[in-house]
Structure formats: structure tokens, C-alpha cells
Amino acid sequence: MKLRNILILLVALILIYGILIAVAELPPYGNPDNPAYNQVAQRYINQPIEDTGVPNMVTAIVLDYRAYDTMFETIVLFTAALAVVITLKSSEKGGGDQ
Amino acid sequence: MRDYILKRMAAVILGFISMYGFYVILHGHISPGGSFAGGIIVGLSFIAFSTIYGIQDGSAKLPEKILVWVESYGTLWYGLMGLVGIVKGAPFLANKLAGVDLGTPGTLSSGGLISLIGLGVGIRVASTMVTLFFTLMEEEA
Amino acid sequence: MHFIAVDYWIMVLSLILMAASLAMYFIKDLIHAVIVYGAYTVTMALVWLLMNTPDLAITEAAAGICTTVLMMVAIFRTSRKEE
């Protein structure tokens, strides 16, 4: 038991060290020169009103530029509700599966 | 919970909470918020109602048939809105390319299909939350 | 690397977030852990608000309370104490 705890501590320390090195390499928060702000983000920030007629950038991205993502996100929600209903309602009818 | 004060306060407040949820859904394209947050607020008002007044009254307010109907056809509504683009000769889920009138930016009727899609998404998120709550609670009887 | 006043508030709130996360792990009574989770969500909504994202703040507040309610119902259906 002791050896197992020591091994877990060792693995956790190694992983924390690696993640801290990776975090130290990240660009500063909110810097406009970050590599994430490429021409796609420039376009989404600069002309959502010309493209979609919506001043709220988040809604413009979620429901117009990335409408496919939102569509399958709603399907994921639908599947989750369906799974809960199937799992919890089936025993009530007495289907005789058990 | 069978508290008199709680029931009277809920009778006053919950309608406004539900109305605020619909406000957040319908104004999702011109103010912070959006269809997901608004739908969850609408669902939370019904969850609070059935917590305070008992699960029987809550189920009487929103029968299971209506919940299943809204949940299924709300998902289909998104696909139908996407088919508008195909009918107009543009890609699936196209808004400006399909030639929909975008209106004046900043007004409630602007955005073309966005507000219609947002209304469908908000209503079906609300029905999902209420369905999860009712399904988890009703088994207890 | 310079800090502005908002960053200090985010640091304080991050400490609260860490304390809440650790508390959720160590608390054995699950209902108390879910209450701490509710405090965690409200703090997270404040952090989103300080980062100038009101959309995420509203969604986090609403969805956090809703998942708290659903977790509470799930605990009532199963057992309250963690084994």
C-alpha cells in the first residue's frame, strides 16, 4: 500500500511538472498578437453585422457561422433526455425484461 | 413543501421568471444571453413550480404528451430552418446567402432565421430540463 | 507581465474555486458537496463576468443552478452518504 501511494505521488508530480511547463509557454491572456487571433477571428469580430445582421457576436457565431455545431449540440441534448427517459421509465411498464 | 408563504410568493414571482426567460430567448441576438440560457431559465421556473406545489400539480401544468411533442419537434424545427437554405438554392443552414431579409441591426425582428432558430432551441432546452426533472422525480411515488 | 485590478479579483476568485473543488472531494455528505458545487458555479459566473463575457456568465449561472437541482434530485433517488 505504501509503495502504491509513493508511485501515485511520483506520477502526479511528473504530470504537474509537465503541465506547469506547458502553461508557462502559453501566450499572455488577452494579447492581440496571440496565434489564436488569426483572420477567422478577425472576420468574426469585424463584420458580424454585415454577414448576419446581429450585433451580438456570440449569437452570430453560435447560430449562424457555426450553426452545424449548435444543431448537433441540440441533438446531443435530445439524446441525453431520451437516454434518461428510456432508462428510468421502462421498469414502470413492467415489460418483463427481468 | 406545503408552506403557505412560499406558495403565495411563488404564485407571484414564477410568472415573471418565466417571462424573463422568454425575454432572454427572444433578445438573444441583440443583448447578452441566448437561447440556451433563456431556455434553462424557463425550465427552472417550471422546476421551481413543481418543487413548491408538488409533482402532481407540476405534471398537470405540463403533461408528458406536450413535453415529448415539444422536445421531438423542437429538434426537427432546427432542421426545417436549415432546409430554407436548400429551397432557396443555397447551402444547408444558410442565412444571408439564402436571401433572407436581415432587417435593421439592433431591432427585435433582425437577424433573419437566427431568432427563429433561437426560439426553437430555447423551447426545447426548457423541455429537456423539465423532462429530466420529472423523470427523476416521478419514480419516487 | 503586468497585472490590472481585475486580475487580482480573478486571483481571489480562483482561490475560492480551488477551495471549493477540494472541499467537494473531501466532503463525504453528498448533499453538502452539491451545495458547495452551487457556490462553485456562482463564483465561476463572477469570473466570467470579470473576463467581460456576460453571455457565458448568464449561461453559467442558469445551467449551474439547473445541474445543481438535477444532482440534488439524483441524490434523493439514490443514497446520501458516500461509501
Image (tube, rainbow, N blue to C red):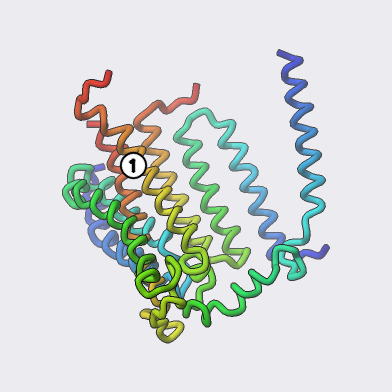
- Identify which residue, C1 or A8, lies in the foreground: A8
**C9 on left or right of A96:** right
Instruction: Give how far across and how far down residue B38 sits, in percent.
Output: 39, 62
Where does the N terminus of chain C fall, quadrant-wise? bottom right
Labels in figure, total: 1
- Which chain letter matches label 1? A
- For residue C45, what is the image quadrant? bottom right
Is the residue A36 above or below the residue A50 in the image? above
Disc 1 residue crowd, few under 14, some 14–19, many 20+, Cα 10 Å = some
Q: Amino acid at mark 1?
A: Leu
Who's the residue at 47% across and 63% down the image?
A67
Q: Secondary structure at mark 1?
A: helix
- For residue C31, what is the image quadrant? top left
Instruction: Give how far across and how far down residue A9 sits, in percent.
Output: 76, 26
Instruction: Give how far across and how far down residue B2 sits, in percent.
Output: 22, 43
- Identify which residue, A2 or A39, lies in the foreground: A39
Who's the residue at 23% across and 58% down the image?
B11
- For residue C76, what is the image quadrant? top left
Residue underneath mark 1:
A82
**C21 on left or right of A95:** right
**C82 on left or right of B47:** right
Instruction: Give how far across and how far down residue A66 sits, in percent.
Output: 51, 63
Is the residue C51 above or below the residue B99 in the image? above
Q: Residue furthest bottom?
A: B104
Who's the residue at 52% across and 53% down the image?
C42
Who's the residue at 60% across and 67% down the image?
C52
